[in-house]
Image (cartoon, coloured by chain):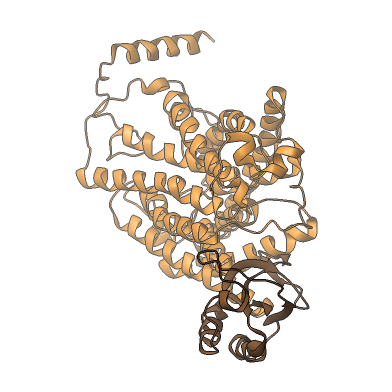
Chain colours: A brown, B orange
Amino acid sequence: MKLITAIIKPFKLDEVRQALTEAGILGMTSTEVKGYGRQKGHSEIYRGAEYVVAFLPKVKVEVAVPSPIVESAIAAIMRAAHTGHIGDGKIFVSPLERALRIRTGEVDQDAL
Amino acid sequence: MTKISAACAAALCALLSAAPALAQETSKIDAADTGFMIVATALVLMMTLPGLALFYSGMVRKKNVLATMAQSLIATAIVSILWGSVGYSLAFTGDNPFIGSLSRVLLQGVGVDTISPLAKTIPEILFAAYQMTFAVITCALVGGSVAERMKFSAFMIFCVIWLFIVYIPSAHWVWGGGFLQTMGVLDFAGGTVVHINAGVAGLVAALMMGNRQGFGRENLSPFDLSLAVIGTGLLWVGWFGFNGGSALGANSRAVFAIVATHLAACAGALVWSGLEWYERGKPSVLGVISGAVAGLGTITPASGYILPWHGVVIGLVAGGVCYWFCTVAKHRFRYDDSLDVFGVHGVGGILGTLLAGVFATRAVTASASEPGVSGLLEGDPHQFLVQAIGVGVTIAWCVAGTFVSLKIVSLFTSLRVSGDDEREGLDIALHGEALHHQ
């Protein structure tokens, strides 16, 4: 099992959700976050005063997936979240040791 | 002193007996003029509440929104009471060239059918109320320069003192039969009295109090420009009462003033956003509303003396010059006029008062009793010189008067909040309230 964490542009959330559903992933968590990478935020000018807004609004999507479909999930996110402009985001994949469904007590792959 | 005591005693008696004063002139009240001026009075009050309150609070940071609104609210409350008590009398009665009389203290002698010689077709009480709304917005405007750092109590005391030292004499000089009016200075709706005074006072106060923490380094960007847009809309519409109402009657001059006002606002908005578009590639919403307010402020002194198309030219000039002051001069000289009261209103007022001397049109300024005035455009440089004197006198008095006012305030309390309170935000520190709770 793997935990895929994707940082994406907020307006891409619906497309990413749809793509992951089509890839067979049944659940996911999204969180509104702020951050920056190489984009280094953006600048805003108010009556000649320039302010650098370092932390830009992003959405963090977390999905736990069985190992065999990790690549297709990643491909789905890559495709749906891509605009080609700076600030499209990042995908992180980390090992997932255990998963439990609270209602039934099912574990690991059965719990996903 | 004896005279003052006698006037106060008489006023008190009149107030306590609550009897209407006897008519002092034959009634010539005109129903149409009265109806129009009631609406104009309401419109001008709407400019402060809620117009200016929203315009200003949308441009400050979230932690100072309520405190900024509070300045407009408290200025309205304080100035209205003072105006009814003494302000109207000192500004708009008497023959003295420098200050009015005490004949209308506590509105004594103002009856249901008394008329001011300065507004001969509406009830005097309506004229006093209309002028009250001007005093209110002028004091409230000053608050924009010192937003996010001035103590609420200091601002309250400032409103009291500044009204007497700067606003009331100025209103008397230009509108109440004072020496500037006698000299022929044209100020239809407040280029000197309202806008130069508010802008210059704001600049002096900003310089005396120092810049906000983080000015030029930290993000001081506006909390919610949509509030500022709504505020601008209310100001814009209210300005029809401000400039149109200054004709003091439902007549052609009022309509000319309203049309010129609207055209100037549109021209100002187009120029400011056009300059932004050219310089940085994007026209900002703040730029559109700033340009509109610059156009409105600048047309104000000239609005009832010119042709409508002059309004377009004045708006174009206002958009360019005020833009330069707000985006270049302020940063070059590093003064923190928080919400650009000087850059928009002060500069606009100076510009508009001078331009009144350029565009004054004999056909518009003439009345049944007056032959009319020609400006530079009609070949007469005299009016321009008179306007320049009016500007110079107003600036000089306002600089000195504001300095003295703030020095007096600082005898009672510090002008500025503590560093910690400024960091925490004035809403919590001064009012114990927050804009939003989770």
- Foreground residue among B248 and B39: B39
Residue B292 appears anywhere in the view: yes
Q: In the picture, residue B393 is in which quadrant?
A: top right
Count of numbered circles in the view = 0
Q: Is residue B282 above or below residue B343?
A: below
Q: Residue at x 70, y 35 (%)?
A: B417
- Foreground residue among B415 and B131: B415
- Foreground residue among A64 and B375: A64
Q: Is residue B166 above or below residue A1?
A: above
Residue B322 locus on image (x, y percent): 63, 62
Residue A56 locus on image (x, y percent): 67, 69
Q: Quadrant of the N terminus of chain B?
A: top right
Q: In the picture, residue A57 is in which quadrant?
A: bottom right
- Foreground residue among A48 and A11: A11
From the viewer's perspective, is B13 left or right of A89? left
Q: Residue at x 55, y 50 (%)?
A: B57
Residue B226 locus on image (x, y percent): 50, 61
Q: Residue at x 44, y 58 (%)?
A: B236
Residue A83 appears anywhere in the view: no
Q: In this view, does B397 lie above or below B252?
A: above
Residue A104 locus on image (x, y percent): 51, 67
From the viewer's perspective, is A32 left or right of A39? left
From the viewer's perspective, is B13 left or right of A83? left
